[in-house]
Image: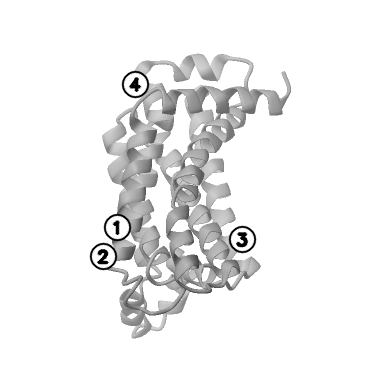
Amino acid sequence: MSAFSNIVTILKKELRSYFNSPLAYVLIVIFLLAAQGFAFLFGGVFERQEASLTESFFFWHPWLFMVLAPALGMRLWSEEQRLGTMELLLTMPVAPWHAIVGKFLAASVIIFLALALTFPIWMTISYLGKPDHGVIFAGYCASFLLGTSFLAVTSAVSAFTRSQVVAFVIAVAVCLLLILAGFPPVVQFLNEFRFGEMVAAFGVLTHFNELAKGILVLRDVFFFLSVTGFCLYFTAVVLKSKRA
């Protein structure tokens, strides 16, 4: 079989696994309730008197994906190790990166669906005013890139352990560090030691906020793609060491 066929086969298998259990449905519902609930209750969608979702809606996404992406991805490799099926998978005529990409894409589909199903808030803001749809689209792209980056981080962590709980806790901690690295109060504090901007360059908020404002800079897109690519490559390194 070709690489593409292998990836598609694993993608379909993983999607069936997600939707044959309550996990995908529960996480999607939690995201929809939390994202739109925070936007209306704490984001002040109506109080702001402006047709924009940047500060009211997308503002909360890094904090939501910090938990939901690890919850979605903690089973990627931990479950295979717990059930003893990873050895079988790695001895099949399938390159490790086929499995890594297939599993990652399947989980990414869940993130895409969760974001797509928030369309009512887009329709609401469009009904109430005249928003810049280009900025809103950029915000969705930023959220998807952020969510998949956190998912890739979780994939790398999951490859280390057979415990989903351990994978979840460590992945949340790593994602939190990536957020705090670009969190304004942290950056201001580190500026006193003259390396706040350097640390902020590695923080997801620095790049996410620019994209969410509709400022599509290749540097920010490249940052998220680099984090995702590095973590998936690191996953392959860990799996290769287990295969040896």
Identify the element where label 1 is drawn: helix
The disc label shown at residue 171, or none: none
Q: Earlier in the sequence, mark 1 or mark 3?
A: 1
Compute the Cα span from label 1 to label 3: 31 Å
The disc label shown at residue 41, or none: 2
Up/down of 125 relative to 10, above or below: below
Q: What residue is shown with label 3?
A: 222
Up/down of 9 relative to 88, above or below: below
Query: Marks 2 and 1: CB-CB under 8 Å?
Result: yes
Of badges 2 and 3, nearer the viewer stands: 2
Q: Amino acid at mark 2?
A: Leu
Q: Amino acid at mark 1?
A: Gly
The disc label shown at residue 82, or none: 4
Left or right: residue 160 compared with residue 116 = left
Res. 2 image quadrant: top right
Query: Marks 4 and 3: CB-CB under 8 Å?
Result: no
Q: Amino acid at mark 4?
A: Arg
Q: Earlier in the sequence, mark 4 or mark 1?
A: 1
Q: Nearer the viewer, residue 184 or 93?
A: 184
Q: Where is residue 108? Give x, y as percent.
A: 51, 41
Q: What residue is shown with label 1?
A: 37
Of badges 2 and 4, nearer the viewer stands: 2
Residue at 53% over, 54% down: 145
Of badges 1 and 3, nearer the viewer stands: 1
Residue 122 in sight here: yes
Identify the element where label 3 is drawn: helix
Compute the Cα span from label 4 to label 3: 35 Å
The quarter in which the N terminus is drawn is: top right
Query: Marks 2 and 3: CB-CB under 8 Å?
Result: no
Other residues around mark 1 within 10 Å, as few (<14) / some (14–19) / many (≥20): few
Q: Where is residue 170? Give x, y as percent.
A: 31, 45
Q: Amino acid at mark 3?
A: Phe
